Image (cartoon, rainbow, N blue to C red):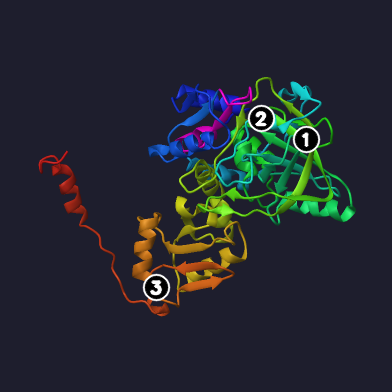
Amino acid sequence: MGYRDLRGFLAALRSTGELTTVEAEVDAELEVAAITDRQSKLAAGGKGLLFRRVRGTPHPVATNLFGSPSRMATALGVESLAELTRLMERLIADPAAAPAPRTVADPPCQEVVEEFPELGSYPFLKSWPADGGRFITLPLVFTRDPESGAGNVGMYRVRLFDGQTAGIRWKPGSGGFQHHRKYLAAGAAMPVAIAVGVDPALTLAASLPLPEPFDELTLAGFLNGEPLEMARCLTSELLVPARAELVIEGRIEPGESRAEGRFGNHTGTYDEGEQVPLLRVTRITHRRDPICQATVVGPPPMEDCYLAKAAERLLLPLLREICPEIVDISMPLEGIFHGCAVVAIEKSEAGQGRRVLEALRREGWLKKGKLLVVVDAGEPAGTLSGAFWQALNAVRFPEDLVASDGCLGVDATRKFPEEGGGRFQELRQDPAVLAQVEARWREYGFE
């Protein structure tokens, strides 16, 4: 079982000693990010952080809450992230197991209503010195298709310009991007709502490239074990999480845009930014004493890497729908946001490794992955060092490379004789000798 809101998750982290509360006054410009970055580079991802006193605002900010495998598992109410694969398999087998969201009245997210909104009164972060300004880094952006009325939630970068305006950078091809194009074509203003500080399952779901028939709200309800509660906005028909800490309502007028400026990225360099649609804020609502959740984007390991590892486990069954021979997948943290993946398969016939690569390039959530390496299932193939070792032993250059559109695929499976490989016998210790060594280990003088 998951959590109904961010506060339940914070309470769980506090009870397990995984949350550090910082009482010293800190600055949302650079200082919070520097502290968070240093914590995320510690062994086991450091601690989740709650900054109680942020200069210039009465509101606290929480960071690094998902910044380790154990905290990410706690966030989703599972013992380990491996359980997510079994949960997704169950959902694929029975889509009706995911409960539809329900709309409630008098939601906590509207306990306080700001008639004259001021974005600058909240502790949104400037993370890197040359960033264009402050960004909302864990925003859940809600939109609606103007033709069908179908809703969407995605996680898109939000740059604050001043107290009443912000810019939203849609991911090309995303639901929000498609909705915006339709509003532009119709010459109509587009309603938008941004939720900050929601339950962890919804945060994860909003970041996923989900194929139909799955959607973010029902997936979050499935992971939480109960329907997600939603509430109607005050200035539009959009629905938002009823227990969000903060909701920003606004609209995008047709054709209005502004340069977002630089943004420090996971590549370790600055994204130069682009012209983005301009959001004019119409209302801000929030819970009493709202907690602003944020993340810091930068060189790994960072908190967002563990959100991506949870996504890896959750989306693995969808890859098996494309290629049933896939046994497992591992996305090293160093390349996780480039779609770098080691894909382990049970190879049974010649040419199978290459066919898997080609299938993953045609469809599925890894089709734009910068580097895909297909290896034979079994240890140590699922690790980066194991895949590298196997690739050096098994890859024939350039025959086993598949390059297209700036992406590289590597068939690092051992080759059968009919595909040019030789006969081989893997090295294995004698089982009887291994058992003897195990039994006598202390006798040898080892602990």
Image coords of residue 436 (percent x, y): 15, 48
Q: Measured along the vertical axis of the image, is residue 208 above or below residue 54?
A: below
Q: Earlier in the sequence, mark 3 or mark 1?
A: 1
Q: For the residue labelled by badge 2, is the local secondary structure a helix, a strand or a loop?
A: loop
Q: Residue at x 60, y 48 (%)?
A: 263
**Quadrant in the picture for residue 240:** top right
Q: Amino acid at mark 3?
A: Lys
Q: CA distance from mark 2 to mark 1?
A: 15 Å
Q: For the residue labelled by badge 3, is the local secondary structure a helix, a strand or a loop?
A: loop
Q: Which residue is mark 3?
A: 415
Q: Residue at x 48, y 27 (%)?
A: 19
Q: Earlier in the sequence, mark 3 or mark 2?
A: 2
Q: Which numbered marker is on residue 282? A: none
Write the start and end of the magenta stretch as one range: 53-76
Q: Which residue is mark 1?
A: 249
Q: Amino acid at mark 2?
A: Tyr
Disc 3 and disc 1 in contact, CB within 8 angstroms: no
Q: Residue at x 71, y 56 (%)?
A: 173
Tell me, yes or no, if residue 244 can be seen here. no
**Quadrant in the picture for residue 152:** top right
